[in-house]
């Protein structure tokens, strides 16, 4: 159950941009690149890093118009995704990888009961699998119909999974290493010009070389506008070793689950192995400040707060000129859930040191009346002299199958 919830979290969590009212129009670009680093001391006891690309333009992630139309013609379908996650659902062998067609359980079942779930799911899956194999360049075979049921537990990366029930038609094929999978699928599906534009793409390529990294590629069809996704995720849990149990026995456990990990000073780029992060050259000469984002989520074991950041803190949005400044916007400063987004403004790069945060996990926070802090209380360690601190009030949220890049309203796929 935990693995299926984790996988759905990878698939369904996206960074959503809502529209803004500005005095001048932002340039339109459909390619969205994001990096997310989740320091989770509470749920998974891990550090999860991911690089994701989203678009509503199928000239960028190149699924055919005909295939997208077939997917969207079935209102029951929420997503179609390839993943090489081990045991993507219960019963899948470790040497297999999956293609999953995700259905809304209620729409699939209708008024006919549980038998209709399998019958209707199998029927739609049989109709689509040939097209799916052609689009992904694979030969997957039917495995099972699997129900992802809400177990009532909190999701470490969003609330959407605790309220939604999903059914998947699962197809399997022989598993390959993530680096090989990344190369095959990116060359087949991602526009060549984007692959050659560097930036976050190069980071994703390197992340795919890490052991146990997960590649997730496909179409999110929950809304009226399909969103194409290409994502690489890696979860660091420390080394695996034997731990003595209370009854004197022994069990295999990851280091972070036993000893935890330190969040007093975090560097989001460190786990990605880079000293400097550059935006895609695809954005050169265009003012598209919302198309590249670095997100940091901290789920601390004990009440915590951000003491210091090494770049600007951004607090409100008034004009286009405001978002030309780079810095952190905090969507949450809660003591038990810190969520920050770094925006590049007019800059094309950021260093690892500029993204460093210092966190305080003091017992004194338990005694405070407020469960969050004001960003005014966060110190800025590397603020340029003479430069005013700008901030952006921006409704960027983690949401399930939301419509990304909404400010691009009016864009239509090429036919």
Image (tube, rainbow, N blue to C red):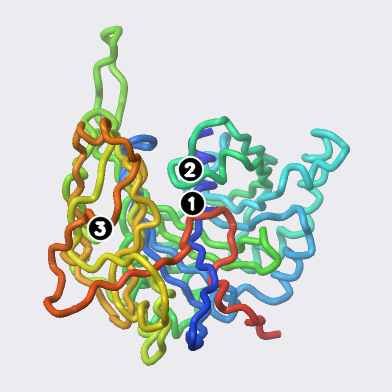
Helix, strand, or loop for circle 3?
helix
In the rendered image, the quadrant that contains the N terminus is: top right
> Closer to the N terminus: mark 2 or mark 3?
2
Label number found at residue 6: 2
Specify which label sits upstream in the sequence, 3 or 1. 1
Nearer the viewer's eye, disc 2 or disc 3? 3
Of residues 363 and 39, the one drawn nearer to the viewer in this rendering? 363
Q: Is residue 315 left or right of residue 144?
A: left
Q: Which mark is residue 10?
A: 1
- Against 2, is 212 above or below? below
83, above or below 40, in the image: below
Determine which of the numbered discs, if any, sits on residue 56 in the image. none
Q: Disc 3 or disc 1, which is closer to the eye?
A: 3
Measured as percent of width and height from the top left, residue 99 is found at 60, 53
Q: Secondary structure at mark 2?
A: helix
* Mark 1 surroundings within 10 Å by alpha-carbon count, few (fewer than 14), some (14 through 19), many (20 or more): many
Q: Are marks 2 and 1 in contact (CB under 8 Å)?
A: yes
**SS at mark 1?**
helix
Instruction: Point out which mark residue 376 bears.
Output: 3
Is 296 on the left or on the right of 144, as rendered? left
The quarter of the picture where residue 240 lies is: top left
Q: Residue at x 70, y 70 (%)?
A: 68
Q: Position of residue 293 (x, y in %)?
A: 38, 68
């Amino acid at each position: 159950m935990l693995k299926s919830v984790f996988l759905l979290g990878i698939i369904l969590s996206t960074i959503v941009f809502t529209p803004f009212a500005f005095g001048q129009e932002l340039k339109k670009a459909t390619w969205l690149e994001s990096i997310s680093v989740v320091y989770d001391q509470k749920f998974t006891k891990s550090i999860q890093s991911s690089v994701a690309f989203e678009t509503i333009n199928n000239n960028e992630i190149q699924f055919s118009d005909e295939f997208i139309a077939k997917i969207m013609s079935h209102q029951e379908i929420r997503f179609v995704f390839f993943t090489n996650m081990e045991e993507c659902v219960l019963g899948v062998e470790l040497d297999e990888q999956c293609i999953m067609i995700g259905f809304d359980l209620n729409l699939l079942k209708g008024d006919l009961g549980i038998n209709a779930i399998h019958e209707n799911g199998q029927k739609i899956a049989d109709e689509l699998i040939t097209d799916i194999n052609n689009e992904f360049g694979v030969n997957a075979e039917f495995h099972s119909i699997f129900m992802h049921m809400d177990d009532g537990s909190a999701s470490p990366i969003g609330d959407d999974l605790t309220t939604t029930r999903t059914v998947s038609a699962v197809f399997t094929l022989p598993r390959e290493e993530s680096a090989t999978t990344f190369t095959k699928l990116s060359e087949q599906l991602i526009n060549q010009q984007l692959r050659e534009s560097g930036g976050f793409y190069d980071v994703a390529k390197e992340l795919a070389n890490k052991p146990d990294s997960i590649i997730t590629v496909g179409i999110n069809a929950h809304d009226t506008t399909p969103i194409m996704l290409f994502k690489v995720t890696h979860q660091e849990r420390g080394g695996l070793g034997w731990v003595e149990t209370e009854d004197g026995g022994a069990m295999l456990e990851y280091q972070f689950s036993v000893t935890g990990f330190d969040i007093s000073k975090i560097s989001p780029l460190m786990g990605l192995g880079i000293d400097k992060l550059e935006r895609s050259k695809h954005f050169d000469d265009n003012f598209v400040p919302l198309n590249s984002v670095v997100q940091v989520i901290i789920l601390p074991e004990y009440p915590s707060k951000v003491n210091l950041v090494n770049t600007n803190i951004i607090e409100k949005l008034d004009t286009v000129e405001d978002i030309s400044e780079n810095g952190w916007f905090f969507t949450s400063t809660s003591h038990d859930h810190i969520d920050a987004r770094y925006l590049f403004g007019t800059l094309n790069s950021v260093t690892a040191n500029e993204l460093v945060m210092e966190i305080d996990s003091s017992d004194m926070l338990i005694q405070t009346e407020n469960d969050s802090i004001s960003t005014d209380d966060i110190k800025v360690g590397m603020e340029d002299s003479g430069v005013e601190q700008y901030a952006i009030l921006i409704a960027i949220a983690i949401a399930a199958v939301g419509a990304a890049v909404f400010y691009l309203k009016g864009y239509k796929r090429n036919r």
